[in-house]
Image: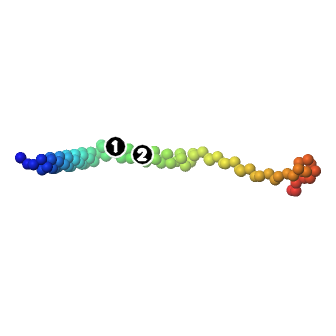
């Protein structure tokens, strides 16, 4: 029997090796499934139809945004300061120039 330190190290080594094996096996299974789907004419035709629909939707969304966007509201013009009136002009004694 191996010492405790070596036993823990070996256990960890086995666990890591099994995790890497299962990860690689899952990747192989996925790649095979993707290759099988890519070879299926019905699936490729459906994918092409979906791609066309997405392109059309994108074009139509841009057309709506560009052509039918409501015009932005204009900000009100800032008020110009009024000339100050003197006490005499308020009473009608003198009128401001201009």
> What x and y, as percent, mark residue 89?
89, 50
Q: Which residue is mark 2?
A: 54
> What x and y, as percent, mark residue 66?
55, 49
Residue 93 versus residue 2: which sits nearer the camera? Answer: 2
Instruction: Give me the residue at 77% from left, 52% from top.
Output: 81
Few, some or many residues within 10 Å of mark 1 (<14, 14–19, 20+): few
Label 2 element class? helix
In the current view of this chain or complex, which residue is farthest to the bottom? 97
Label 2 vs 1, first from the N-terminus:
1
Few, some or many residues within 10 Å of mark 2 (<14, 14–19, 20+): few
Residue 39 versus residue 1: which sits nearer the camera? Answer: 1
Q: Which residue is mark 1?
A: 46
> What x and y, as percent, mark residue 51?
38, 47
Q: Tell me if 72 is positioned left or right of 43 in this view.
A: right
Occupied quadrant, residue 97: bottom right
Instruction: Give me the residue at 85% from left, 51% from top.
Output: 85
Q: Tell me if 15 is positioned left or right of 71 in this view.
A: left
Which part of the image, by quadrant, shows the C terminus?
bottom right
In the current view of this chain or complex, which residue is farthest to the left? 1
């Amino acid at each position: 029997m191996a010492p405790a330190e070596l036993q823990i190290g070996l256990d960890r080594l086995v666990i890591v090796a099994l995790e890497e094996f299962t990860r690689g096996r899952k990747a192989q299974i996925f790649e095979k499934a993707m290759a099988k789907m890519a070879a299926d004419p019905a699936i490729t035709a459906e994918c092409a139809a979906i791609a066309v629909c997405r392109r059309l939707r994108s074009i139509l969304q841009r057309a709506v945004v560009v052509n039918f966007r409501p015009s932005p509201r204009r900000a009100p013009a800032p008020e110009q300061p009024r000339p100050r009136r003197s006490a005499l002009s308020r009473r009608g004694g003198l009128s401001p120039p201009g």
